[in-house]
């Protein structure tokens, strides 16, 4: 495979995705600051998972289709995008922890810092307690559990897609099969171990795979075999889907609670 920084890897700017990001951030902020206003606002994290799965899969599929995909390039780009902000957060946490925390608390913070750098925070917090317990406020890096799950997905997903592409498998069937497995694990954990369900990558990957399926669908529609729709349908269908999607998010925020089974 070529190790290239060709512009074919770069996706076109999507203002709609930026809008979804802003909505996800707003929901999470409102949930933590004013939980009674949006008691299901934590689903903003799930929105991020779907967005991440969509963007990463779009990048990989575009590289594979043009024979320009490079594992080296892919992971270097991920490091460049993630590590500056992550290192700033970790450095700030070390400084503030040194000033304000007791030695025993600083030791716990150190364990969480190592987990964050190694992208296994979700497993660390899983071994300690649930996300919604009373001690969550004492864990300033707790939010990095979601980043850990994303990075764990990024480690294995490019290889799976590359193998599927090289073996000429139906990518849509591959994604659906993995989605079903992950979702089944999710349902099982939700009934038997809710905390494990919350932090486990196996029970979370279906969300990223949802974005992956949409990316593959969009990639297929933009290819040679895309279906030609009448002009009125080409305009109306995206609007209808957008309205339905927003309505589903509103329902998710209003009917989901911290104590709800996941998925609710």
Image (cartoon, rainbow, N blue to C red):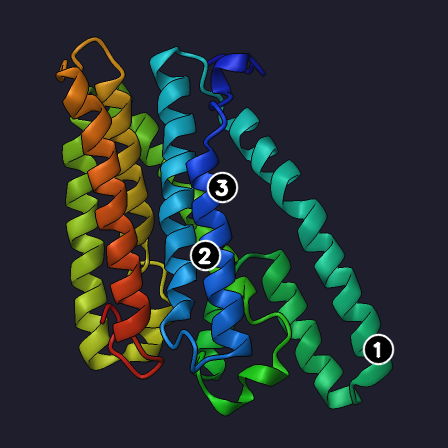
Residue at the spot x=33%, y=74% of the render? 196
Residue 125: percent from left, percent from top: 50, 75
Quarter of the rendering occupied by the C terminus: bottom left
Q: What element carries label 1?
A: helix
Residue at the spot x=51%, y=21% of the render? 10
Quarter of the rendering occupied by the N terminus: top left
Residue 163: percent from left, percent from top: 29, 27
Q: Which mark is nearer the camera, 2 or 1? A: 2
Residue at the spot x=25%, y=74% of the render? 255
Residue 207: percent from left, percent from top: 30, 52
Left or right relative to 57: residue 82: right
* Residue occupied by mark 3: 18
* Residue occupied by mark 2: 24
In the image, residue 63 sits, relative to residue 49, either above or below, namely: above
Q: Is mark 3 on a helix, strand or loop?
A: helix
Alpha-carbon neighbours of circle 1 within 10 Å: few (<14), some, or many (≥20)? some
Q: Can residue 121 be seen in this view?
A: no
Answer with the quarter of the image where residue 204 lies: bottom left
Q: Which of marks 2 and 3 is nearer the N terminus?
A: 3
Q: Earlier in the sequence, mark 2 or mark 1?
A: 2
Quote the CA–CA distance across marks 1 and 3: 36 Å
Which label sits on residue 98? 1
Residue 209: percent from left, percent from top: 28, 45
């Amino acid at each position: 495979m070529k190790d290239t920084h060709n512009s074919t890897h770069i996706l076109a700017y999507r203002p709609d995705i930026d809008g979804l990001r802003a909505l996800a951030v707003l929901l999470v902020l409102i949930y933590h600051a004013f939980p009674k206003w949006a008691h299901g606002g934590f689903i903003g994290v799930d929105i991020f998972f779907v967005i991440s799965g969509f963007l990463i899969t779009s990048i990989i599929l575009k590289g594979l289709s043009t024979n320009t995909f490079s594992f080296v390039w892919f992971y270097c780009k991920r490091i460049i995008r993630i590590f500056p902000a992550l290192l700033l957060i970790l450095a700030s946490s070390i400084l503030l922890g040194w000033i304000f925390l007791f030695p025993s608390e600083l030791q716990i913070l150190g364990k969480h810092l190592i987990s964050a750098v190694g992208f296994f925070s979700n497993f660390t917090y899983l071994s300690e307690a649930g996300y919604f317990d009373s001690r969550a406020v004492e864990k300033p890096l707790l939010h990095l559990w979601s980043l850990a799950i994303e990075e764990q997905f990024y480690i294995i997903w490019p290889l799976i897609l590359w193998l599927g592409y090289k073996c000429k498998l139906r990518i849509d069937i591959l994604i659906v099969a993995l989605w079903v497995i992950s979702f089944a694990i999710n349902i099982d954990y939700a009934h038997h171990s809710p905390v494990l369900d919350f932090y486990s990558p196996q029970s979370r990957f279906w969300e990223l795979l949802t974005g992956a399926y949409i990316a593959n669908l969009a990639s297929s529609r933009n290819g040679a075999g895309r279906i030609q729709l009448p002009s009125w349908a080409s305009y109306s269908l995206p609007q209808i889907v957008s309205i339905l999607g927003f309505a589903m998010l509103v329902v998710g925020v209003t009917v989901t609670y911290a104590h709800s089974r996941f998925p609710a």
